[in-house]
Amino acid sequence: MKNIWIVIVNYNTEEYVKKCLSSIEKLEKENFSLNTIVVNNKSERKPVLQLTSYVRKNYPEIFFIVNEKNVGFSGGNNIGISFALKKGADYVLLLNSDTCVHPTLIRELFEVFEQDNAIGIVAPKIYFAKGFEFHKSKYSQEDLGNVLWYAGGEMDWKNVIGFHRGVDEVDHGQYDTVGETQIATGCCMIIKKEVFKKVGMFDERYFLYYEDADLSVRSRKAGFKILFTPRAFLWHKNASSTGGSGSALQDYYITRNRLLFGMTYAQSRSKYSLVKESMRMLLTGRKWQKRGVIDFYLRRFGKGSFSIA
């Protein structure tokens, strides 16, 4: 029987964690052992104490780790992954705290691995949770809950911009084919232990954003395949712990980390374009975009200069 561990990182999303755990409780658990770890990334004291009490009362089998400092999405997940591997995990499912999963999620993800021993990571189809779409007025009531957030991930290497296939589209089955994809999303992906043994875990220099793209690239370079399967799916309350799309936090970490990612993996022409773009951003960018550029060149990684607890 395979041993699967779910890792959830919490940062001030306590109410979402409760709903996420409730959906996990309904997962089909045939033919595998399932365990869950919640890693608290220094959320506000009172809410996290309440969450700890809630988990111990309602889910005594769940492991709860409290960090003394915020080590970011990458560091928080690494703590959970390390714990799971020490406990004998064969597979680790990374899951955002602001998600709700379909009961067949893990069964459908796990079945993909049986197709090819070279498969190292499998990513599911992810929908926007109702009311969390980018363009809410665009959809009818019947569309809500069926709007795609992720149906595979690709990288535009010329411009060094990652994008989700199908994002903002209503799902009509247009991406209902299992196949390889370039970038798995940290929102939800299942990774077999051999990947961690060969390429390591998340690069903690990223702290937040682009760490999943970095792990995806390293995994593919090491010979592992990344597959997308539409038969596994869940719902995501997008950007619930980061201030939403276009926030100062996103300006800073996406700007800095895109430079780090691109200068690590892109071709020379794209690197040259990135440098030119970064110089323009220093002159015309928003406050935290400018700070992100500066910190990249000063090699201030991890948490960096952004003011976050």
Image: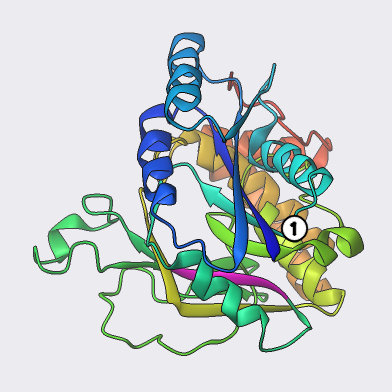
The residue type indicated by label 1 comes to: Phe
Which quadrant of the structure image shows residue 140? Answer: bottom left
Taking depth in this image into account, of 235 and 163 the one nearest to the observer is 235
- Residue 244, relative to residue 133: is it above or below? above
The residue range painted magenta reads 120-125
* Left or right: 236 as drawn, with respect to 97: left
Question: What percent of the width, then of the height, locates residue 264?
Answer: 83, 61
Residue at 89% over, 60% down: 197
Res. 154 in view: no
Question: What percent of the width, then of the height, locates residue 28?
Answer: 45, 63
Q: Identify the element where label 1 is drawn.
A: helix
- Residue 203, relative to residue 242: is it above or below? below
Residue sticking out furthest to the right: 198
Magenta stretch: dominant secondary structure:
strand
Which quadrant of the structure image shows residue 1? Answer: bottom right
Residue at 80% over, 33% down: 300
Residue sticking out furthest to the top: 46
Mark 1 Cα shell of 10 Å, populated few (<14), some (14-19), many (≥20):
some
Check the picture and name the quadrant holding the C terminus: top right
Taking depth in this image into account, of 287 and 90 the one nearest to the observer is 90
Residue at 52% over, 42% down: 250
Residue 193 lies within the magenta run = no
Res. 36 in view: yes
* Left or right: 18 as drawn, with respect to 76: left
Question: What percent of the width, then of the height, locates residue 45?
Answer: 51, 10
- Residue 88, relative to residue 13: is it above or below? below
- Residue 217, relative to residue 99: is it above or below? below
Question: Which residue in the protein does label 1 denote?
Answer: 261
* Left or right: 159 as drawn, with respect to 149: right
Count of numbered marks: 1
Taking depth in this image into account, of 139 and 36 the one nearest to the observer is 36
